[in-house]
Image: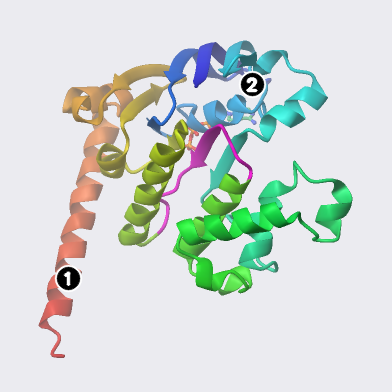
Amino acid sequence: MLRLIGLSKSYKAGDKALSDVSLDVPKSQIVGLIGPSGAGKSTLIRCINRLVEPTEGEIRLGEVDLVKLGTAELRQARRRIGMIFQEYALVERLTVMENVLSGRLGYVPFWRSWMRCYPPQDIRRAYELLDRVGLMEHADKRADALSGGQRQRGGIARVLAQEPELLRVDEPTASPDPNTSRQIMRLLTEICAERGLPAIVNIHDVPLAQQFMQRIVGLRAGRVVFDGAPDALTESALTAIYGAQDWHAMRQGDEEQADAEADTARRLAEVPA
Ligand SMILES: Nc1ncnc2c1ncn2[C@@H]1O[C@H](COP(=O)(O)OP(=O)(O)OP(=O)(O)O)[C@@H](O)[C@H]1O
């Protein structure tokens, strides 16, 4: 369980990026964080493992307030917090297997990682994870030989190798292919349910968030202005999050994209086999 209590962040330049944010994310719950550019989504995600130091508030993971930890304890605690990035999911020149094993770096002695000599149980576990994300037959390929969606799956396996108690996910849906985005979201939601993992997902695609998230938190100018189930995200809630003008522009953009996708599908259907 993750508990944020009265979290605030002011950057040196004077911007108040977060104001008094309080959130509880119980086990297995996957929360979509939405909001306009500059609302504070990345700041919130980064504050959780103190990559950005909060100005005020508490960050409780289980019984521990991460804000109070010293450097060595924080390093230990960070192993329990997985981060999945949209880009840079894997180290390209390493194999998929080596990438997954690198999730164990925080747990094995330095010489083992340097020699790439991981304990047998870590290797067994890495194979299980590759199997779970559907990459078993790609284990020995270099990461740069994978498609974008496969790399994201590899990134998920690597984070799971870390045995996290919490997942933070940065924009998993920036993929140009909507099918890939949906597959990745489905995989993430299944994995959170299977492992009882709480997750916070920084997500720009509102319809996708509504489809896959159990709960949506809307930020605007560093404050939580919506916190509820996806079907409670009405026009007026979206206007409170994005502002009337931006929300209508976004919706129009979505409709244009849906039209373009339908048009492409129609054309493809017309092409003789
Ligand atoms: N390193 C920094 N130094 C100073 N101000 C910052 C820094 N990082 C972010 N900010 C400011 O904090 C506010 C929140 O930014 P943040 O990046 O968290 O928003 P966001 O919701 O993630 O935006 P986006 O969707 O565009 O990524 C913005 O006003 C931004 O200019």
Vertical arrangement, residue 9 with respect to residue 170, above or below? above
State how far apart marks 1 and 2 are (Cα). Answer: 47 Å
- The answer, for residue 203, to whether it is visible in the render is no
- The answer, for residue 268, to whether it is visible in the render is yes
- Which of the two discs, 1 and 2, sits closer to the camera? 1
Q: Residue furthest right?
A: 111
Question: What percent of the width, then of the height, locates residue 12?
Answer: 68, 20
Q: Residue at x 34, y 49 (%)?
A: 186
Nearer the observer, 108 or 57: 108
Badge 2 residue CB within 8 Å of ligand 1: yes
Q: Residue at x 57, y 74 (%)?
A: 145
Question: What percent of the width, then of the height, locates residue 78?
Answer: 68, 32
Question: What percent of the width, then of the height, locates residue 44?
Answer: 53, 26
Vertical arrangement, residue 124 with respect to residue 186, above or below? below
- Helix, strand or loop status at disc 2: loop
Which three-letter amino acid code belongs to the residue tagged 1? Ala
Of callouts 1 and 2, which one flags the residue occurring earlier in the amino acid sequence?
2
Instruction: Find ligand 1 in the image and state its quadrant.
Output: top right
Q: Which residues are magenta?
A: 162-175
For mark 2, what is the residue? 11
For mark 1, what is the residue? 265
Q: Is residue 21 left or right of residue 14?
A: left
Image quadrant containing the C terminus: bottom left
